[in-house]
Amino acid sequence: MILIPIIAVIFALALDFLFGDPANRYHPTVWIGKLIGKFVPYAKSTNPVIEKTNGILILVLVIAIVSFLVTSFSSSLKYVENFDSNEFYKILLIGASIILVGILLKTTIAIKGMEDHASKIMDSLSKNDLDGARTKLSMIVKRNTKNLDKQHIISATLESISENIVDGITGPLFYFSIFGLIGAFVYRTVNTADSMIGYKTEIFRNTGWFAANCDKILNFLPSRLTSLVMVFSCIILKEDWRHSIHIMKRDGSKTESPNAGYPMATLAGALGIKFEKMEHYVLGDGNSEITERHFRSAISIMKVTTVLFALLFTIPVILLLSSLGWWFNV
């Protein structure tokens, strides 16, 4: 039934806006991370080829486990939809399906969680606790935060917010709209693996090679589509949307990642500020100090982009695929 995934998307977003993430012990994405962490030590080898192969096997194995569990759940929903019972029980079963799908989809999304964590960083800065802000920032970025000054800490925080719009919101929604829950969870599995081992360091260069490249491929379309939706958000919020387009086109490809630069450049352009990762990139051309106002504007853009993406892409794609005879498998 087509209403299940559509209402589940709305329910998932509402849950996240209101309550944020569940405790780690109840969070499937955390479980996936722990599973990856269990396998990683076995990937180590003095032979780079063997290490790369082991990295591939780890990701494929974890994806297979996650896919099996999600597919089993989806199969049970098909049974519910076809269950021969009176109308009252049929409605109850469909309602339960929507709630369960919504809850599971919500666990692949992080809107309020990102806002809460970023707010803690800003709170530490407001108290001039740079060490505390650096420590909190290190939990959401890959760069070394030990020597960052206040402006670079705020810049990195806003960059993470813009990246999270894709990784933690529109990416899962993009793949849910096409492949259902299994799409959202496979995407989050790859994204989680990339955040854990997708580093070009001596330790993870080979083990995380496959995860990093899968993440690049999966994010290619969502990152660019998200940047366009962010522009519409800027129009609604009366931010500088024309400048956001200019900076996105000019600086979107300047980052080492082929995808991360697009939402980051769009946000920098909209807010008239400059993002800088020392010795790596500079996005935007603003010279003003990044302040609490810019942070609040970034959060607003993230939230409005979430709603617009669901309305302009996720739900229409679900409806389109259904009208074309695609059996939507939540």
Image (cartoon, rainbow, N blue to C red):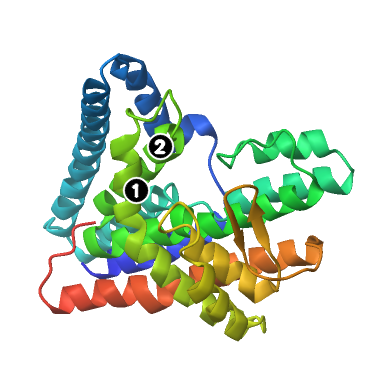
**Do the residues bearing badges 2 and 1 touch, measured as CB atoms within 8 Å?**
yes
In the picture as drawn, the residue positioned furthest to the right comes out as 127
Q: Which mark is residue 215?
A: 1
- Label 2: which secondary element: loop
Marks 2 and 1, the one that precedes in the sequence: 2
* Residue 203: % across, % down: 43, 23
For disc 2, the neighbor class at 10 Å (few under 14, some 14 to 19, many from 20) is many
Which kind of residue does numbered mark 1 sit on?
A: Asp
Residue occupying image coordinates x 13% and y 55%: 83
Q: Which mark is residue 198?
A: 2
Q: Few, some or many C-alpha atoms within 10 Å of disc 1 (few <14, some 14-19, many ≥20)?
A: many
Identify which residue, 64 or 209, lies in the foreground.
209
Instruction: Answer with left or right where residue 118 lies relative to residue 199.
Output: right
The residues tagged by marks 2 and 1 sit, at their Cα atoms, a distance apart of: 9 Å
Q: Residue 193 occupies which quadrant of the picture?
A: top left
Quadrant where the N terminus is found in the figure: bottom left
Which quadrant of the figure contains the C terminus? Answer: bottom left
